Image (spheres, rainbow, N blue to C red):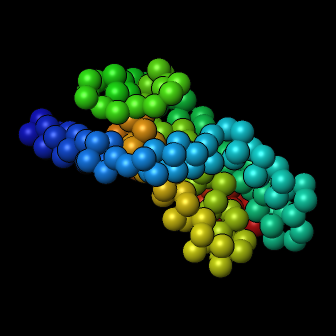
Amino acid sequence: MSKVVNWLQHHETRMFHFVNQRIQHFFLDHFFSTITHLGGATATIVISLCCALFGQGHLKTAGIQALIALTISHIPVAVIKKKYPRLRPYLVHPQAITYKNPLTDHSFPSGHTTAIFSIIIPIMTAIPVLGVILLPLALIVGVSRIYLGLHYPSDCLVGCLIGTATALTTIALWG
């Protein structure tokens, strides 16, 4: 079992270093530093609230579902971060590139990735055509967390799974 775990850790570290160091570019620095905030508390709460308060029909329902999913999704995130405290990659790998105001809490799973997926899934379900924009946007938020040196790829993958599962469960129990 430890061989499998070591193999996975080795390849995850390689993926982290590729995204964090090999694809560095001035434009990407600014792009990812900006886009990452779409998964933050302020943006996800404001987007969900706006849909819930000002949306009509399916969008209004999706906004309410997004608020519920966003709230519930952070319960497992908090529990997992406490139970499996994983240092952020920039704290483990001295050569990692990080940007202003790096976080110091635990990295596993990614709260930003969880949040963005928990709000886009209800919106995509209500208005499927928006999936063409929202799904790539959510994936880019996840990549931004790796690029900025704050998360390993598995942190973002698990965040994506938690956010998606919570949103789908919320939608399923809604109707």
Q: Where is residue 174 in the image (x, y as percent from the top left)?
A: 75, 61
Q: Which of 165 and 37 is in front in this view?
A: 37
Q: Which residue lies furthest to the bottom in this view?
A: 129
Determine if residue 134 is in view.
yes
Residue 49 or residue 76, whichever sits in front? 49
Residue at far left of view? 3
> Residue at left 51%, top 65%?
136
- Say whether residue 82 is visible: no
Quadrant of the drawing holding the C terminus: bottom right
Seen at 68% across and 62% down, the residue is 122
- Return the residue nearer the eye: 143 or 98: 98
- Compared to 175, does 113 lie above or below? above
Q: Is residue 7 left or right of residue 146?
A: left
Residue displayed at 52% across by 50% down: 31
The quarter of the image holding the N terminus is top left
Vertical placement of 170 versus 95: above or below?
A: below
Query: At 74% from the left edge and 44% from the top edge, which residue is drawn?
Result: 45
- The residue furthest front is 26
Instruction: Estimate the x, y position of residue 10 in percent, counting from the top left.
Output: 16, 40
Left/right placement of residue 128 relative to residue 109 reads right
Displayed quadrant of residue 154: top left
Q: Position of residue 37 (x, y in %)?
A: 61, 43
Residue 124 to residue 77: above or below: below
Q: Where residue 160 sits: x, y (%)?
A: 48, 52
Query: Tag count in the figure?
Result: 0
For residue 61, which quarter of the picture? Answer: bottom right
* Residue 6 in the figure: left or right of residue 125: left
